[in-house]
Image (cartoon, helix red, strand yellow):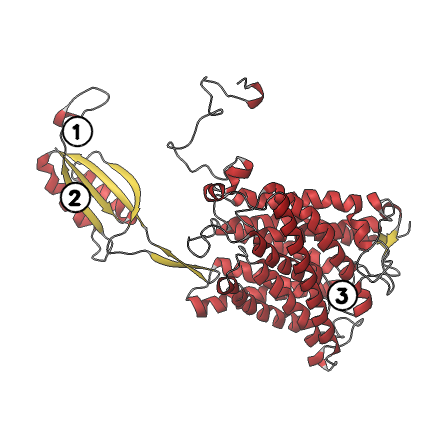
Amino acid sequence: MHFNAVDTVWLMTCSALVLLMTPGLALFYGGMVRAKSVLNMMMMSFASIGVVTLIWVFYGYSLAFGPDHGLGFVGDFSDLGLSNALVSTIGAEGHQVPTLVFAFFQLTFAIVTTALLSGAVADRIKFTAWLALIAAWVTFIYIPLAHMAFASQNGDGGLFIDRLGVLDFAGGTAVEINSGASALALALVIGKRVGFKRDPMRPHSLPLVLLGAGLLWFGWFGFNAGSALAATGVAVVAIFNTQIAAAAAALSWIAVEWKRDGRPTTLGVASGAVAGAVAITPSCGYVTPMGALVIGLVAGAVCAWAIGLKYRFGYDDSLDVVGVHGVGGAVGMLAIGLIASSTANDAIGDGLFNGGGAGQLVRQTVGIALTAAFAFAGTWLIATIIDRLIGLRIDTEAEIAGVDTAEHAESAYDFAGVVGAGHVGGSHHSGGHLNFRRNHEE
Amino acid sequence: MKLVTAIVKPFKLEDIKSALQEQGVHGMTVSEASGYGRQRGHVEVYRGAEYTVDLVPKVRLEILAEDRDVDMIIDTILLTAQTGRIGDGKVWVTPVEQVIRVRTGERGETAL
C-alpha cells in the first residue's frame, strides 16, 4: 500500500483536532444552559461520540463514501465494517492516504455535526429519545448530505461536489446549514422549554462557554485545513483564513452588542468566534486572507442579529444552532459565489466580485436551498416519528426540577451546604455505613 | 435584651465588623441575603435577550445585645455602612425574651 506519509500524518493530526471539538462543544453548550441541565447537555455530546462512531464503523462510512450507483445522494454497503478501507488508499495523485485515516477524519465530522443538534433541545429531551434521534439522524440525514458534499468519485459521486458544481470546502452544507435547518425542525417538533421568554434562562457558567469556544476554535483548524485532505498550500490558506474569520467575527459580534445593548459581552465574543469559524468553513480554501476578513466581519454581525429571530418567531432553538450555524453557514456559502479567488486556489474560478460570472453564486444558492430543504423535512419527519413512538420530552415536572436529576440521577455542582445536602445511601437507608445498591436487600 | 438586625451592602461587611469589634462587640451572626427595597435590581443581556435581576445581594448581620449597648451598635453600623446612595440597607431592633448559652446552660445577660 503506497501512500504519502506527510499527508497521512496531517490527516491523523486533524482527526484528533476535530474530535476535540465535540468535548469543546459540550463545554460551550454546557456553560450556556442552567446549572440543572449542564450534565445532560454535555452527555448529549459524549453520546454522539459513542453512537456515531459505532454506526460509522458498521455501515456509516460505507453508506456515505461507498461508490455512488445513482444520482449522487448516497453510497452503498460495499465497505461494511471498514473492510475495504482497511486495505485501500484514497486521494489525489501523489497525495494518497490510507482510506482508514480518511474514514476516521470524516467520522469526527459526523460526530460533531450530530452533537450540534443538542443545542436545539436543551433542558427537555429524554435521553432515550436523544439516542434514537441521533442514530436515525446520522443515518438518514447526515450520511446522504455528507455523500452529496464530500464524496468525490471522478464526477460520478456526490450531488454537490461532483454533479452540481457547488463549492463547499469543509462542510457549509453537510455540517453547518444541515445542523441549522435540522435544529429548526427539532425545536419546532419538541416545543418550547417551560418558561421560554418568561423565566430568566441565563447561562450558568460563562467561563465554561469561553473554554468551549477556545477548544472549538482550536479544533476547527483541523476541521478546515484537514479538508484539503493533504498538507498542501491550500491547506495553509484554509488554516490561516480560519483564524482570520474567527477573530474578525468575534469583534464584529461584540461591536453589534455594544451598539445595540450597551455592553460587549463574553458570551458575544465566544459566539462571534464560532460564527466566524462557521462562515469560513465552506469558504476557507477558496478565498484570500482579506476575503476571510470580510467574511468574518459580516458573519459576526449577521449572526448577532439572526439569533434574535427565535424570539420574534417564537421557536425555542435554545442555544441558537439556527442563528449561528444555519445562518453563518449560508453566509459562507454565498461568500464563495461573491469573492472566491483563483489566486487563493487555482482549482476554481473567480467569484462575482472578482470578475467571475454570477454562475457560481447561483450554484451556491442551489446548494444552500437543497441542503436546508432536505435537512428540515427529513429531521421533522424523524423527530415526529420518534415523538409518536417513545415521546421526545421529559415530563414538565422533571423539566422544572432539572433534566440532570431526572435522566441521569446526578447533580453537576454540590453547592447545597448543610441543608439539602442529603445523606449516604437510598431513601430507605437507616444504618451508619455506605449503602451500595448491589448490597441493598429491600 | 435586644436583637439588632442589619441588612447592609456586602462590601461594607468588613468595615462594620471591625468597627463593632473596636467598640467591644464580640459576637454576631452573618448571612448572605437577597432582596429589594427602593433599590431595584439590574438588567443583564445574553445574546440580545434582556434579563431583569430583581433581587440584589445583601448581607444580614444579627447581634444579640444588652439594652444599654443598642444605641452604640446602631450608631456604629450607621457610621460605617452609610454611602448616602439608595440601597444602603436597614437596621431594626427587636426585643428578646430569653438567651441561653448552649455549652453551659447560662441564661439571660450572662449568656450574651
Which residue is disc 2 drawn over? B92
Q: Is residue A423 left or right of residue A272?
A: left
Query: Given this view, does label 2 or label 3 mark the residue nearer the observer?
Result: 2
Q: What is the C-alpha distance between the residues marked 1 and 2? A: 19 Å
Q: Chain of mark 1?
A: B
Q: Chain of mark 2?
A: B
| SS for callout 2 | strand
Callout 1 and callout 2 share a chain: yes
**Nearer the observer, A24 or A11:** A24
At label 1, counting other C-alpha atoms closer than 10 Å, the crowd grade (few under 14, some 14-19, many 20 or more) is some
Q: Is residue A394 left or right of residue A4?
A: left
Q: Quadrant of the N terminus of chain B?
A: top left
Q: What is the C-alpha distance between the residues marked 1 and 3? A: 79 Å
Which residue is disc 3 drawn over? A234
Q: Position of residue A2 (x, y in %)?
A: 91, 52
Give yes or no for contact between labels 1 and 2 (Cβ–Cβ under 8 Å): no
Q: Is residue A412 visible?
A: yes
Q: Position of residue B91 (x, y in %)?
A: 18, 45
Q: Is residue B17 above or below residue A25?
A: above
Location of residue A375 by image quarter: bottom right
* Amino acid type for the residue under numbered disc 3: Val
Give yes or no for contact between labels 2 and 3 (Cβ–Cβ under 8 Å): no
Which residue is disc 1 drawn over? B112
Residue name at image x 72 percent, y 80 percent? A358
Q: Position of residue B72 (x, y in %)?
A: 12, 42
Q: What is the C-alpha distance between the residues marked 2 and 3? A: 73 Å
Query: Which circle's residue, 1 or 2, is located before the other in the chain?
Result: 2
Residue name at image x 56 percent, y 66 percent? A303
Q: Is residue B54 above or below residue B69?
A: below
Q: Chain of mark 3?
A: A
Q: Is residue A289 above or below residue A14?
A: below
Residue sticking out furthest to the left: B68
